[in-house]
Amino acid sequence: MRKIAMDETISRCPECGSVNLLFDKRSGEISCVGCGYVIVPVMADAGPEWRAFDGEKEDDRSRSGAPITMKMHDKGLSTKISWRRRGRGEMTKAQLEKLSNLKKWDRRTQVANSNERNLTRALSELNSICSTLAIPDAVSETASVLYRKALKNKLVRGRSLRGMAAATVYLACKQCGVVRLLPEVARATNMTKKEVGRCYRLVVEVLSLRTPAIDTRLYVSRFVNNLNLKGDVETLALEILENAKAVGLTSGRGPIGMAAAATYLASILLNYRKTQHEVAEIAKVTEVTIRNRYKEMLERIGMDVYI
DNA sequence: AAGACGAAAGTGGTTGA
DNA sequence: TCAACAACTTTCGTCTT
C-alpha cells in the first residue's frame, strides 16, 4: 500500500505498471486491477475533527458510532446489551431479572429469524472469499448488497449458500470492472465452476441486472501481470487485440480466450517465450483454445507488422 | 523431454422452431 | 420443450525443437 498526496495524479500502477486502475468512491482508494495493489490518497481523516480533554467533554461531543457497512448483517447499526456484571450492586432482584430477560431477547431478536441467520453466515463467507481473492473493499460491499437482494427475492432458499455468495462476488467483480475468473471464485469456495455459474445466471436473470462484459483489455493486464511480463508485452498484446477486433475476430469468441491468445502471441513476438501451457494455466482456459484463437489471429492479421 | 499441434469426442449453454 | 448449433474442454497420438 502506498500513500500519495491529494494533488498527485496517478495513471499507472507503481507496482506493475498497468494502466488499469480502479477508483473506489467510497473509500477514496485507487487499486490496480491487474495486481490488486492499493494506493491511498492522503485525504479526509475518518476520525472526529475535535479534541476533548476530559471525559465529560468526550461524552458531550461523541457522535453516532461507526460508519454503516453492508458487510454486517445489521449493517453495524444495532446495539448490544453487555453481559458484563457492571453496576449490578444497586439493583433489586426484580430489576436484575428484568435485565437478564432483556439481554436474552436482545440477542435473540438480532439473529433469530432465518433470513438474518442466513445473512450472517453468508456475509462471513463473502468476506472470506474476498480476502482470499484480494478483492477491493468497494467490490465486496457491492457483493453484500447483491446478496441481500438475492435473499430478499428468495433465491437462496433451497440452494447452496456458498454458491450464492460466490456468485454475488463474481457478479460484483463484473459490475465494478475488476477481473476475477469464474474458476478462481469457484475455487475460493470449494465449489465447481458449473455450480457457481448456475447461481450467477440465476441472480442476473431474476434481479434483471445488466452485466457489462469485462473489457477484454483488462484480462490482458491481469494475465501479463500474473505471468511476470512487462509493460511492453501488455502494449503489444493490446495492439494485437485491437486489430483482431477490427477484422471481426472477436465476435462470438470468449473474451478470455482472446486475451490469453493475444498475451501468448505478444510474449512470443517479444521473445519472452511463455508456453501455451503457462498462459493457459493463468487464464484458466485450455491450450487448445489459445491455439485456435492465435491461429486465427495469425491468419487474419499479419504478424510481420509487429516484428 | 518438453512443447506444440490437431483430430475427435464430449460438455453445457443458447437459440429458434 | 427439444433439436441444432457454436464455443470450449478433454484426451490422446504425433511431430518439432
Image (cartoon, coloured by chain):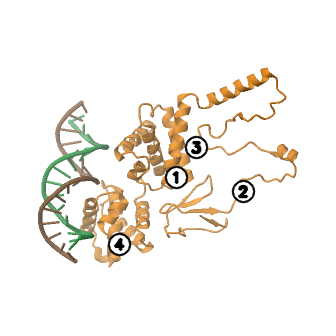
Chain colours: A orange, B green, C brown
- Calculate the distance from the C-alpha at mark 1 to the C-alpha at mark 3: 13 Å
Residue B10 drawn at (x, y percent): 20, 46
- Calculate the distance from the C-alpha at mark 4 to the C-alpha at mark 2: 44 Å
Q: Residues within 10 Å of mark 1 (few under 14, many from 20)?
A: some
Residue A11 drawn at (x, y percent): 55, 68
Residue depicted at x 28% and y 77%:
A304
Subunit under mark 3: A
Label located before the other in sequence (1 or 3): 3
- SS of the residue under disc 3: loop
Mark 4 against mark 3, which lies toward the viewer? 3
Kind of residue at disc 4: Ser
Task: Tell which of B16 and A69 is nearer to you.
Answer: A69
Residue depicted at x 36% and y 59%:
A283
Kind of residue at disc 1: Ser
- SS of the residue under disc 2: loop
Question: Is residue A246 visible in this depiction of the protein?
Answer: no
Kind of residue at disc 2: Asp
Mark 2 against mark 1, which lies toward the viewer? 1
Taking C5 as reference, is A99 left or right? right
- Calculate the distance from the C-alpha at mark 4 to the C-alpha at mark 1: 31 Å
Q: Which residue is mark 1?
A: A131
Label located before the other in sequence (4 or 2): 2
